[in-house]
Image (cartoon, grey):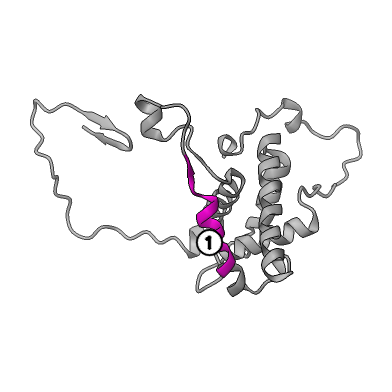
């Protein structure tokens, strides 16, 4: 997750105990302003709404997102995210004269679908990549990288939450016995590829 946010290494003093004898509990400083926090909450609810399983809001995603932005995100990531949030609110204000958070869930979804499509449209690469970098999509970019990070983090934080892990994601064992699709002999050698290891 730190790589995704473009974070720097954590300084050792971050783990140090507070100085002095008096240990006071200090409330964590919020990264987002109240209006930005409301927008992040509205986005989380639009991406993963509450259904018969927990939504992103009840899973605590907005608070975790705020904490990651405040404690881990690089200056570049922070700037991209803030700019993208402003762009989303501008879109809502121009369409309905209301902020995105003030819209109904149905209207938020209606506005966000075309915005999402335009924001995540790939941007042609200037430099041609080769080898593993090309296969992994290194250097790939989209029109609005800040929105891309917001969406990725909200979805990632949700599915890493206890609520999603225990009430949303279900493990279903593949029925039947395992039948290999490759005939293995003593002469067979292991080979691997992206996401594959056979041996």
Q: Which residue is disc 1 drawn over?
A: 114
Quarter of the figure with residue 42: bottom right
Nearer-the-camera pick, 177 or 192:
192
Residue 4, image x and y in percent?
56, 38
Mark 1 crowd level (few <14, some 14–19, many ≥20, 10 Å Cα): few
Residue in view at x 56 percent, y 34 percent: 3
Q: Is residue 104 above or below residue 33?
A: below
Q: Is residue 23 left or right of residue 131?
A: right
Let me know if residue 74 appears in the view. no
Say what secondary structure mark 1 lies in.
helix
Q: Is residue 39 left or right of residue 160?
A: right
Q: Which quadrant is the C terminus positioned in?
A: top left
Q: Is residue 27 left or right of residue 139?
A: right
- Which SS does the magenta portion mostly show? helix
Residue 21, image x and y in percent?
91, 35
Q: Which residues are magenta?
A: 110-123
Per the image, is 33 magenta? no
């Amino acid at each position: 997750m730190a790589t995704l946010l473009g974070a720097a290494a954590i300084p050792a003093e971050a783990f140090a105990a507070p100085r002095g004898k008096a240990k006071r509990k200090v409330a964590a400083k919020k990264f987002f302003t109240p209006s930005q926090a409301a927008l992040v909450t509205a986005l989380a609810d639009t991406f993963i709404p509450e259904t018969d399983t927990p939504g992103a809001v009840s899973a605590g995603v907005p608070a975790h997102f705020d904490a990651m932005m405040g404690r881990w995100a690089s200056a570049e990531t922070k700037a991209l995210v803030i700019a993208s949030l402003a762009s989303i609110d501008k879109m809502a204000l121009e369409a309905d004269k209301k902020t995105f958070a003030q819209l109904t869930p149905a209207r938020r979804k209606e506005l966000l679908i075309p915005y999402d499509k335009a924001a995540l449209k790939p941007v042609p690469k200037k430099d041609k990549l080769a080898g593993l970098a090309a296969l992994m999509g290194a250097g790939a970019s989209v029109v609005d990288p800040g929105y891309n990070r917001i969406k990725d983090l909200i979805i990632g934080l949700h599915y890493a939450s206890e609520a999603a892990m225990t009430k949303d994601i279900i493990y279903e064992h593949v029925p039947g016995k395992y039948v290999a699709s490759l005939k293995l002999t003593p002469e067979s050698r292991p080979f691997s590829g992206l996401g594959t290891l056979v041996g």
